[in-house]
Image (spheres, helix red, strand yellow):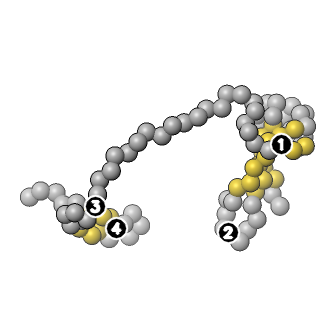
Amino acid sequence: MPAKNVFKCRKCGFEKEIKKGFVSKTERKEREVTVLEERSMGMPTTRAICEECGNDTAYWWLRQLRAADESEVRFFRCTKCGKTWREYN
């Protein structure tokens, strides 16, 4: 008996058989990855003291780490040594 094609829920394990013509196959393309080797990362900078090297300039960005109703976390990366740290509000 040939193996059947099914959709399977990763959370509860429920399975549903895939009927012919229901799913279309597409080719996956390789992703292009850009590696930044320079210190200039194209990110905004601010005045922040690095505890590692004492430099006073850092790149910064915001990330939502928890629920949407909680404030974002601000990350910093030293422009000189590359140390990364975060600031909670």
Give amino acid for label 4. Gly
Q: CA distance from mark 1 to mark 4?
A: 47 Å
- The local secondary structure at tag 2 comes to loop
Disc 1 residue type?
Thr
41 over 87 or under it: above or below: above
Of labels 1 and 3, earlier in sequence is: 3
Quadrant the N terminus occupies: bottom left
| Left or right of residue 55, residue 69 in this image | left
Asked whether the beta carbons under mark 2 and mark 1 sit within 8 Å of each other, the answer is: no
Give the mark nearest the N terminus, 2 or 1.
Answer: 1
Between disc 2 and disc 3, whose residue precedes? 3
Q: Earlier in the sequence, mark 4 or mark 2?
A: 4
**Mark 2: amino acid:** Ala
- Between label 1 and label 4, give the one nearer the viewer: 1
* Pointer 1 or 4: first along the chain: 4
Pointer 2 residue: 68
Question: Dot 1, how many residues are within 10 Å of its Cα: few (below 14), some (14-19), or many (20+)?
Answer: some
Find residue 13 and name its label: 4
Please name which of the two marks, 4 or 2, marks the residue nearer to the observer: 2
Along the line of sight, which residue is nearer the eye, 23 or 82? 23
Quadrant in which the C terminus appears:
bottom right
The answer to whether 79 appears left or right of 26 in the picture is right
Do the CB atoms of the residues marked 4 and 3 lie less than 8 Å apart? no
